[in-house]
Amino acid sequence: MKNTTETTFESAFAEDTFKGLNAFPKFLYSRYIYDKKGDELFQQIMEMPEYYLTRSEFNILKENSEAISEAFSSSDGFDLIELGAGDGKKTKILLKQLLKDKAKFAYLPIDISHNVLEGLEESLTKEIPAVEVKVQQGTYFATLEKLTEYKSRKKVIVVLGSNIGNLHHEEAIEFLENIGHAMSEEDMLFMGFDQKKNPEKILNAYNDPSGITEAFNKNLLNRINTELDGEFDLDAFMHWETYNPETGTAKSFLVSKKAQKVNINKLGLQVNFDAWESIHTEISQKYDDAIVSWLADEAGLEITDQFTDEENTFKNYIFKRKTN
C-alpha cells in the first residue's frame, strides 16, 4: 500500500528509502550499505580472489609510486585530498613514497563512514606517524563544496577504487565538473577507472560463490530492519548481478523470490512486491580510454598522464583543468 500522506523523515536514509521503495521500478542507494557491518563486509570483498580491482590498483601504485610522487610534488608543498578514503591500504603506498621523497604535504582523507575514518586515523598514527593527517567525514557532493577553501597551495585530489563507477555518465560529468571548478591551473586530479574486460571476470567480481557480495548487497535490507524497524526477510530476496559489455555497465539487484508485503514501521509504509520483482541497488561502470577522455572533455578537464597494470584491467589517470 503506497503511503500518500505527508511524511516527516528523521534522516536522509529514511527519506531515500521511502522514495526508492515507492518508485517504479524500485531502487535503493548503495551508499547506505556502508554502516559498520557494511564496512566490514566490503573489507572482506576486497580480499576475495574474484575481486580483482583492489589488487590491480594496488599493483599500479606499487610499481609506479616514484613517478606518481614526482607528479604530485610541489616546491611549495601541497594538500593531498582523498575522496572515499576507505581503509587507506593503497594510499599508504603513496604516503610512504612521498615521505621518502621528502615531499611537503598534508593528507586529508574524506569518507562517508565515521567507522572507516577512525580506523584509518588510528592505523596511520601507528604505521606512518610522520604524516600530517586531517580526517573529514562527509559525502562526495558535500565535500566538493569545501574544496575551494583549499587555495593557499597546490591541491592533489585523489579518488581511488573506481568509485566514480557508481555514477551514471551524466552524474560522473557533473562530479568531475564540480571538482574542476574547485581546481586551479596547478591542481590535479588522480582517479581510478576500472576498464572493460572479459564480461565473465566482471560478473565474478560481483557475484562470488562464497556469498560475501550477496551479504553486502542485502545489508541495505538489514539496515532498514535495524534503523527503520523494517520487517524484511533477507532469505526471501536473492542477489543478482548483470553486465552489459556494450555500455560497460554492471548492475546489482535484490530480487523478491515471491509475492510479499513488507512493513517498514518507522516510515508507516507497507511495500508490495510481486514475485521476481527487483530492487536496483548499485551500478559499477567500466571504461576505456575513449569514454574517460570524453567524460573529461565534457567536464572541462584533460588527461595528462595514465598508469595501468600488466593486464590492462585497471587504470589511474591524472587530469588537469583545460587551458584555453
Image (cartoon, rainbow, N blue to C red):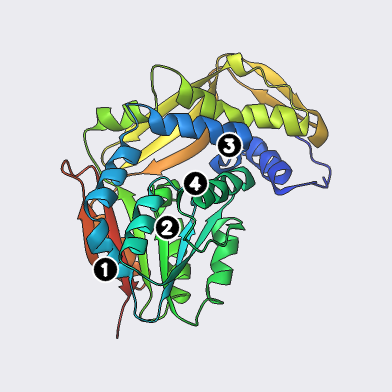
Q: Is residue 208 above or below residue 228?
A: above
- Farthest residue, direction left: 310
In 3D space, how far apart are the residues under numbered discs 4 and 2 (Cα atoms)? 20 Å
Q: Closer to us: mark 3 or mark 2?
A: 3
Which residue shows up at 73% across the image and 42% down it?
14
Left or right relative to 163: residue 148: right
Q: Is residue 210 above or below residue 295?
A: above
Q: Let me know if residue 280 appears in the view.
A: yes
**Amino acid type, callout 4:** Gly
The residue indicated by pointer 3 is 33
Q: Nearer the viewer, residue 188 or 250?
A: 188
Which residue shows up at 68% across the image and 24% down it?
272
Q: Closer to us: mark 4 or mark 2?
A: 4
The residue indicated by pointer 4 is 86
Q: Quadrant of the C terminus?
A: bottom left
Q: Counting residues from the N terminus, which is met first, the one under dot 1 or under dot 3?
A: 3
Q: Which mark is residue 279?
A: none
Q: Is residue 241 above or below residue 155?
A: above
**Amino acid type, callout 2:** Ala
In 3D space, how far apart are the residues under numbered discs 3 and 2 (Cα atoms)? 20 Å
Q: Secondary structure at mark 1?
A: helix
Q: Closer to us: mark 1 or mark 4?
A: 1
Q: Nearer the viewer, residue 289 or 6?
A: 289
Q: Which mark is residue 172?
A: 2
Q: Secondary structure at mark 3?
A: helix
**Amino acid type, callout 1:** Glu
Q: Counting residues from the N terminus, which is met first, the one under dot 2 or under dot 1?
A: 1
